[in-house]
Amino acid sequence: MRRLIPTALLIAPLVVLTWPAVAVGAPTEEARSAVGACLSAVIDGAPVADQIEGEDVEIRRRAEPATCTVTVTGGEPVAVRAAVLEALAKRRERFSPAKTKWDPGKFASRETFCNMPAGRSFNVLVSTAKPGEPLVLTATVLETKARDVRCDRDEGLQTPALPEEGGSGG
């Protein structure tokens, strides 16, 4: 007599084996999508809410100055950074790293990406955390009135201005 194995027993190992890949990929995909939304909001005027909270990613938009910031609190910093750079690479503005470098401070890296010099000027500031930190990455998209000279010239290592203690923090 032939015994039938319940379908659930056949599928269960597949679910268990694929679950970690899905769980690890979620913050990365969420970050890529959020940065894409911020780029579209600032550059194209796409309608994006002032605040959106996902499981591992948050978007905050400001009207003045026109900025859109993505904060990522889940995933591996290297993978999340790669996803953010992929979102930048998909844009027709052809973002590339600024010639001037930034002091990473408490981060693993702090970078500025500038669009090609033509017409409007956009910057994307990306700060990637060291592994094990609760804040994995922040990326801020902004339009500037004029092209920042640091996009095209090495002005030496830059240190970000920190908000004064007790101030609004930005």
Image (cartoon, rainbow, N blue to C red):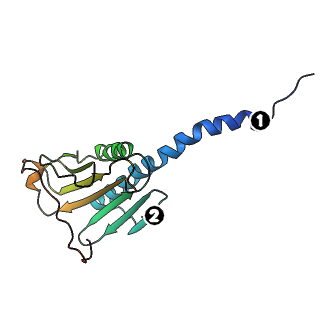
Residue 112: give x, y in percent of width and height.
20, 51
Return the residue nearer the eye: 144 or 31: 31
Q: Which mark is residue 130?
A: none
Q: Is residue 137 rendered to the left or right of residue 20?
A: left
- Residue drawn at x 64%, y 39% is 15
- Residue 32 relative to residue 125: left or right: right
Whether label 1 touches label 2, CB < 8 Å: no
Label 1 – label 2 distance at C-alpha: 37 Å
The type of residue carrying mark 1 is Thr
Q: On the picture, is 41 further left or further right than 16? A: left
Quarter of the picture holding the N terminus: top right
Label annotation for residue 7: 1
Q: Residue at x 21, y 70 (%)?
A: 163
| Residue 28 location (% of width, % of height) | 42, 47
Q: Position of residue 124 (x, y in %)?
A: 24, 54
- Number of residues whose C-alpha sits closer than 10 Å to that of mark 1, classed few (under 14), some (14–19) or many (20 or more): few
User: Disc 2 residue type?
Assistant: Glu
Look at the picture and state if 98 lies above or below 15. below
Q: SS class of the residue under badge 1?
A: helix
Q: Give the residue at mark 2.
A: 53
Task: Name the one closer to the observer, 108 or 27.
Answer: 108
Q: How many marks?
A: 2
- The structure residue drawn at horizontal position 41% and vertical position 45%, both measured from the top left corner, is 76
Which quadrant of the view contains residue 139?
bottom left
Residue 143 location (% of width, % of height): 21, 61
